[in-house]
Amino acid sequence: MRKISNVFYITIGLIILAVGYGVIAAESFEAVTNSIKSFVSSSFGWYYMLLLSFLLVLSLFFIFSPFGKVRLGQDEDRASFSTITWIAMLFSAGMGIGLVFYGAAEPLSHYAINPATAEPNTDAAFKEAMRQTFFHWGLHVWAMYGIVGLALAYFQFRKGEPGLISATLKPIFGKKMEGPWGVLVDVLAVFATAFGVATSLGFGAVQINAGLNYLFGFSIGFTSQLIIIAVVTVLFVMSAWSGLSKGIKYLSNTNLILALALLGFVLILGPTLLIFNVFTDSIGGYLANLVSMSFRTAPLNDAHREWLEGWTIFYWAWWISWAPFVSMFIARVSKGRTIREFMVVVMLAPTVLSAIWFSAFGTTAINMQRKGIADLAKTDTELTIFEMFHAMPLSFIISIVAVLLIASFFITSADSATFVLGMQSTYGSLTPPNSVKIIWGVIQSTIAIILLSVNGLTALQNTIIIAALPFSFIILLMIVSLIKALQSELPKSERPRRRKAKDTI
């Protein structure tokens, strides 16, 4: 326990205060956080749109610039994991439960409940629904994760710095990042990670509960969700104990196998031809409208603006708040890759997999809604996917696979988070002590259980989105620091030169 830093104790204190407020004054906590979140969304929506678009362009720069040849490690280092395992880890940590939770529900919502601009239940709404879903889960978010992960991996494996967010800012602030300012940066990252994963644990427990109710009649409620979280906590703590190369590696590969199996069921048993046609058409629509969607703020249309704040801007803030966790995990498993390889795979592989996933599940759900096979638009979000399966052949088997996948994603996300939280609270150690990982695992589960008991997950979600704003400024500083440090990788002839002032007569 000697390795534990002040970041651990300060963050625990802040978590106790926040959770305590949420329990003692649940309604007030939700009202206050909702008010602040609404202010941030309405006042800084334009900033989030510009920031994520800038990060996408910057990602392309790193891919095509001379920096692309730089290795994330020493020149002789090579990748620790196979490409398939690496992609499985990216996929599991970055999206996880969200893909199953929203796979059918989000496209359906954009089509039948609340489209962005089109009339509900129209062909135009169908096309727009798929395009917007691709946008929310596509290149922008993975470019952001890639840039933050790149900075962390470069400084950690190339420069020998500890695996801390604060360490990436040393080229700008120097030794100050080893003092209180560095602690502040790392506390913000750990706070966002702990609460972000706790929120996902809560939502995951709710969906597993819904699936078990649908399959076996388990009662829906706090007691069932408590049991689910307790069981999953034991499983992910066991996995975290086994280490990165065993537990998380095997779980990530299992996730990929289960996800491909579930996807295969839907592709074969769903409207197969329509799915492939929608996928192809939606990829074209997404790419053709990428620029306009990237900068759309709807300043003169209140209804469209409200939709943007509730969906796109919410997503951008939500993904930013997850950046400390996801990017740090991506960095940790990417040692030995070149910058070009890193950015191409991190951006493209999860984007394409997500597009195929949403095409299959979203098209199947919308097709059922259009043909009157099932009225999924009236179903709760956590039950949408199971109601969709109910209208398909082999529904019981598919639902079993879905519950197993949710549980596997659940365990992997929590497992990855305990590893990252352990790193962040032990001075960036690449092998944090098992005792620290177990403590963080229990803390995350406890947060989820307490807030589920008082219906406080929405307030917690609001808190994470609020934390995204200050962290977005840290991302900008990380970029400046990374580019400054990368200058040393170029041959002297290619480095930018400072012009000397000419003598005046």
Image (cartoon, helix red, strand yellow):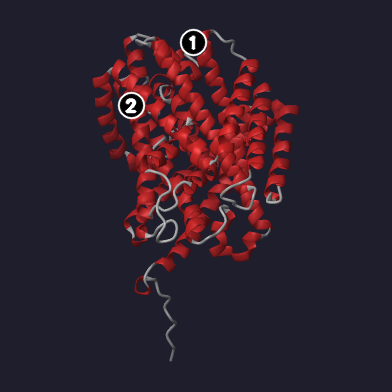
- Find the residue positioned furthest to the bottom: 505
* Above or below 397: residue 169: below
Which residue is rendered at x = 35% and y = 59% of the image?
Answer: 69
The Cα atoms of the two marked residues, 2 and 1, are separated by 25 Å
Which residue is identified by label 2?
Answer: 359
* Amino acid at circle 2: Ser
Comes first in the chain, label 2 or label 1: 1
Comparing labels 2 and 1, the label whose residue is closer to the camera: 1
Left or right of 275, for residue 456 = right
Q: How many marks?
A: 2
Element at label 1: helix
Which residue is identified by label 1?
Answer: 215
- Find the residue positioned furthest to the right: 24
* Amino acid at circle 1: Leu
Residue 37 visible within the image: no
Left or right of 409, for residue 61 = left
Element at label 2: helix
Relative image position of residue 393 (x, y in whole percent): 34, 10
Which residue is rendered at x = 61% and y = 24% of the image?
Answer: 229
Which residue is rendered at x = 53% and y = 29% of the image?
Answer: 410
Relative image position of residue 121 (x, y in whole percent): 35, 18
* Above or below 340: residue 412: above
* Above or below 145: residue 336: below
Residue closer to the observer: 420 or 321: 420
Which quadrant of the structure image shows residue 375? top left
